[in-house]
Image: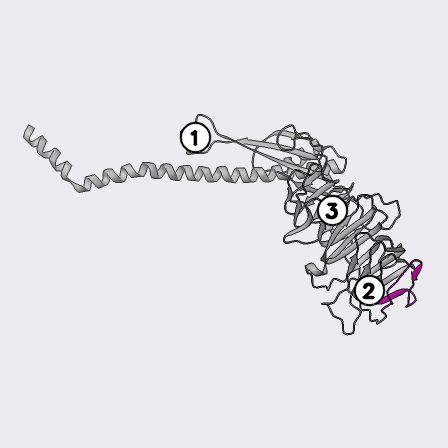
């Protein structure tokens, strides 16, 4: 009997078919477990995504309600009540948030939602269903007015670096990245520094200057202005020497010149109007003064045929004094300098603006295809200066403020209002 039992056990041991069945049965356990967990995990991810969508919708509705002066809590609950996809618990509706990166910010609305539901497979092993929690933060923002707008969308549109010192009570916006790495402490002060990309700050920005990364693009306030005039003229006035010169309008309502040269120590007063300046550009020598009220300088090419490679430019000596106030009406209202948008941008073609303590820039500088480099004396009068250009660079000790009187006519000194998700 014992011998037969031993023989039977040996047969079972040596039977390959039995081993395969055992191995298959053993392998099914982790396989089924993995599949079960995968199905439950996919369901959790789907619930979390749907829950986050509901929180986002609630936060945005709350931010809009805050902007419109409505009851934020009531509006958010109403919007969330219209979401019938899943059962969830409202953990918090806050303005300002009490936790997170935006705690205490009165422009923010925070919504926190949670849900807890059992799933078939995981409930076999878990004592209680896991809780899924999400939060969303939306902002209702009224930005300070932008007086400096860099239009470039691909690289770094606005730069304040080196030893530059900029102080202004308006906003500065770049539709790409923003280099705010000027050396020193508290060397950059503004209402806000905004970038569609990133504002790089090496520590020189004052603590009360708002920094907005991933901001919406700033609109071009001068879109629609004629930046491609077709003026043909050959007038090239003799170089102005000595004090007391006046340059008038040689075509009735406008002046057209291949170039204007103001030599050292000379003073030239421009009659009110628009001045089209060709390939030879405008140069103002040392200790010379250029004055003009209700004027616009349009740098273009006045040849026939038009030559995009020879657009006029401006050259100002560091000790020159430029006192310009923008046109008060007409197609160039609010603009003191416009550069033809057909210009082929290069370092040689940039508009480099500087001046002494007597200089006055009252109006806007518009160069949509070029770079404006501004290096102003800290005591210059720039109470109503705006620069809109593809690239803007600040060098030297520059101080720009934005205190335009009501009705002045300089365009776009108004802040942008927008709603956006911040988290």
Query: Which residue is at the front of the view, 205 or 41?
Result: 205
Quick check: can you spot residue 83?
Answer: no
Q: Is residue 241 magenta?
A: yes
* Numbered disc total: 3
* Mark sitting earlier along the chain (1/3): 1
In front of the other: label 1 or label 2? 2
The part of the image, by quadrant, that contains residue 188 is: top right
Q: Of the numbered discs in the image, which one, if any, rests on residue 396?
A: 3
Real-space CA distance between mark 1 and mark 2, rounded to the nearest whole angstrom? 80 Å
- Residues at circles 3 and 2 in contact by the CB criterion of under 8 Å: no
- Vertical placement of 365 versus 235: above or below? above
What span is in magenta? 236-258
Real-space CA distance between mark 3 and mark 2, rounded to the nearest whole angstrom? 27 Å
The part of the image, by quadrant, that contains residue 97 is: top right
Q: Tag 1's secondary structure?
A: helix
Q: What residue is at 75 percent from the left and 48 percent from the top?
A: 148
Q: Is residue 335 magenta?
A: no
Q: Which residue is mark 1?
A: 123
Q: Residues within 10 Å of mark 1 (few under 14, many from 20)?
A: some
Residue lying at the far top in this picture: please name it: 127
Residue 12, x across and y down, in percent: 15, 36
């Amino acid at each position: 009997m014992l011998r037969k039992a031993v023989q039977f056990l040996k047969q079972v041991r040596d039977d390959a078919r039995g081993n395969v069945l055992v191995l298959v049965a053993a392998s099914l356990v982790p396989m089924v477990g993995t599949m079960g967990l995968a199905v439950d995990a996919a369901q959790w991810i789907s619930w979390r995504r749907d829950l986050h969508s509901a929180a986002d919708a609630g936060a945005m509705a709350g931010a809009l309600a805050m902007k419109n002066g409505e009851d934020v809590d009531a509006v958010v609950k109403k919007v969330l009540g219209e979401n019938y996809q899943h059962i969830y618990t409202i953990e918090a509706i806050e303005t300002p948030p009490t936790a997170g990166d935006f705690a205490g910010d009165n422009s923010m609305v925070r919504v926190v939602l949670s849900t807890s539901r059992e799933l078939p497979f995981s409930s076999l092993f878990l004592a209680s269903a896991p809780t899924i929690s999400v939060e969303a933060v939306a902002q209702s923002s009224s930005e300070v007015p932008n007086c400096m707008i860099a239009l470039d969308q691909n690289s770094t549109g606005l730069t304040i670096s080196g030893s530059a010192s900029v102080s202004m009570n308006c906003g500065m916006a770049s539709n790409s990245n923003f280099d705010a790495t000027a050396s020193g402490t508290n060397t950059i002060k503004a209402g806000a520094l905004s970038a569609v990309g990133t504002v790089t700050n090496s520590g020189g920005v004052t603590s009360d200057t708002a920094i907005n990364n991933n901001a919406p693009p700033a609109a071009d306030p001068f879109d629609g202005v004629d930046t491609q005039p077709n003026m043909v003229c050959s007038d090239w006035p003799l170089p102005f020497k000595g004090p007391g010169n006046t340059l008038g309008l040689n075509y009735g309502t406008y002046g057209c010149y291949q170039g204007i040269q103001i030599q050292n120590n000379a003073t030239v007063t421009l009659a009110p109007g628009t001045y089209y300046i060709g390939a030879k550009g405008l140069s103002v020598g040392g200790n010379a003064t250029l004055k003009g009220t209700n004027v616009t300088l349009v740098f273009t090419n006045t040849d026939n045929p038009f030559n995009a490679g020879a657009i006029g430019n401006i050259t100002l000596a560091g000790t020159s004094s430029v006192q310009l106030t923008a046109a008060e009406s007409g197609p160039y209202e609010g603009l003191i300098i416009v550069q033809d948008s057909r210009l082929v941008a290069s370092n040689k073609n940039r508009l480099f603006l500087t001046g002494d303590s007597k200089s006055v820039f009252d109006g806007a500088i518009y160069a949509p295809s070029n770079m404006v480099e501004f290096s102003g004396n800290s005591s210059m009068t720039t109470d109503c200066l705006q620069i809109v250009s593809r690239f803007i660079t600040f060098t030297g000790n520059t101080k720009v403020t934005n205190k335009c009187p009501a009705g002045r006519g300089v365009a776009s000194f108004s802040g942008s209002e927008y709603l956006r998700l911040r988290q």
